[in-house]
Amino acid sequence: MSKPREMSLQEEADAATDEEANAETPPGSPGGKQPSPAEQAASKAAYEARVNRAKQNVGKLDLKNLALEAELPKGDHQLTHREDNLVHTPRAADEKTVLTVRGAPKHKGRLLMQIGPEVLGSGKVFCAWQPGGQRLAVASWHDGKTEVHCFTRSGQAVASYELCDSKPLWTGWDCNGEVVAVRTEAAGIFLWEVGLVSNPSPPLHLAPAHTSKATFCKWSKLCPQLAIGTSDGKVILYNRLDAVLQLHERKGTLREEVTCGDWLFDNRLALASGQRVKISQPIAETKAKWESFSKFKLSGLGSKIPKHIQESGAPAALAFTLGYPPFVAVTLGGKYLLVFDSTRKAEDIGLTFPPDYGYICAFEWLPGNMLLVALSNGYIVTVDFAALLRMQQGGKLPPKVAAMATNRLFNEYITSMDTTPDQKIVCCGDAVIKIVRNSGVDLEVFAEIPLDRKPVIGECLHSVSWDSEGSAFACASTDGYVYVYA
């Protein structure tokens, strides 16, 4: 098993120096050179091109109501956490009954592959589908080393590499399906250009002096750009088209550790750090630079807000809605989810959940501003957020409304869920994978796929994801297993 190449210290120094050289006042900002009419026209054309490509390439996005001239408000904004904006989600109608298939299953799972500890080791496994679904990348912890593997859809091994002696934390493909990124606990980030070749080159260790502090990373939806946030609040952009890694210390420094983030359809980047969420200018496909555009302050919870919410801490997860204008959902402390309108035209809404249902372990936006929230003790809450907005705009938001429903899907636990463009929902928990569909806020189980697993204290299924076509899904465990079904 070959070992990765490593980016030299000279290349790291160059990346940092490039940022210092580019850290001038950007055109159009106070005190900066105003763009010419030609530059403004070119900027708008580039923006429209990004949006058009988003319509073609990003299946889940709903952009039919997009107004190209609409802009997010610039500057600082204080989010509200008032008692009259707080909504308590309902308890399940039947606490004891687990939602299951009614009648004959409407989907029968077919096992494509199952890979176990003999290949992956007995640690936590992370996997990601290549866009197009032809290959699956897997990062695993095997005999004290992180390894990255590539398998075909049928389970045939393409290649494997040993990366480092630090545990894996995340893996993902760029939007073109050419590069796999692996983030580790302390050794930084690795990039593997595997694509569809049969004999890929060894992975690249991406500037370990900088990326060893990474606490967040995510690929852009539109172009091969990797956003990296660090424990000391720095923003790093890796742009594959330019083959450049840029460390943004002046324009992009955040005050505290970057804990989560998301890319918007027009290539804006949102990052959460401490009690702030920053949204950038649209990031260009080449010569990319991070420049903050809007800043949202999460602190300032009122005295009537429950204490466990006031002490909720930094955001743990963040995601934009699939339509426009974009709403942002942020989880705080595992028990509270705040949704705010990034255009500031609608009031903020906070969602709380029954404390005995566990913590927020996952959430997903569906088209039409429908929100699914998974709670760790086996429940899924469905929220018609569009209906909540209409009630709010009507004058008063009741603390409990009919635009929500809660269902129990698992006896013991749920850890992960994912959705397809046609709104199929896959979720995992106990030793079962379930495929679910929603009708409004009601859920129906289409299929149950029991796995050949024995309950072990401390081990569980921890993630599940559809391929880009929604025709197969992969489920990974904490004890060295990957299960792939169609």
Image (spheres, rainbow, N blue to C red):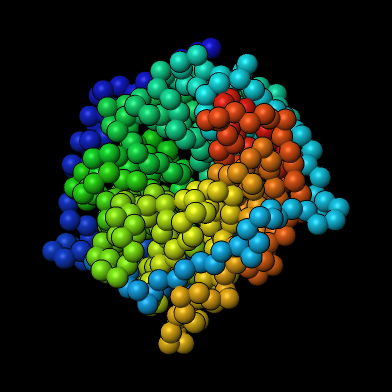
Q: Residue furthest left?
A: 31
Tell me, yes or no, if residue 402 can be seen here.
Answer: yes
Q: At which x and y percent is residue 106?
A: 82, 53
412 to the left or right of 389: right
Tell me, yes or no, if residue 131 can be seen here.
Answer: no
Q: Residue furthest front?
A: 96
Q: At which x and y percent is residue 218?
A: 43, 44
Q: Is residue 473 above or below residue 368?
A: above
The residue positioned 47% from the left and 35% from the top of the image is 170
> Quadrant of residue 293 in the image?
bottom left
Q: Is residue 400 above or below residue 260?
A: below
The residue positioned 53% from the left and 57% from the top of the image is 373
97 to the left or right of 88: right
Q: At which x and y percent is residue 227?
A: 38, 44
Q: Is residue 344 above or below residue 32?
A: below
**What is the total number of numbered labels drawn onto the structure image?**
0
Q: Which residue occupies the foreground of this view, 63 or 273?
A: 273
Q: Which residue occupies the foreground of this view, 204 or 78?
A: 78
Q: At which x and y percent is residue 359?
A: 47, 51
415 to the left or right of 334: right
The residue positioned 24% from the left and 65% from the top of the image is 300
Q: Residue furthest right?
A: 104
The residue positioned 66% from the left and 25% from the top of the image is 115
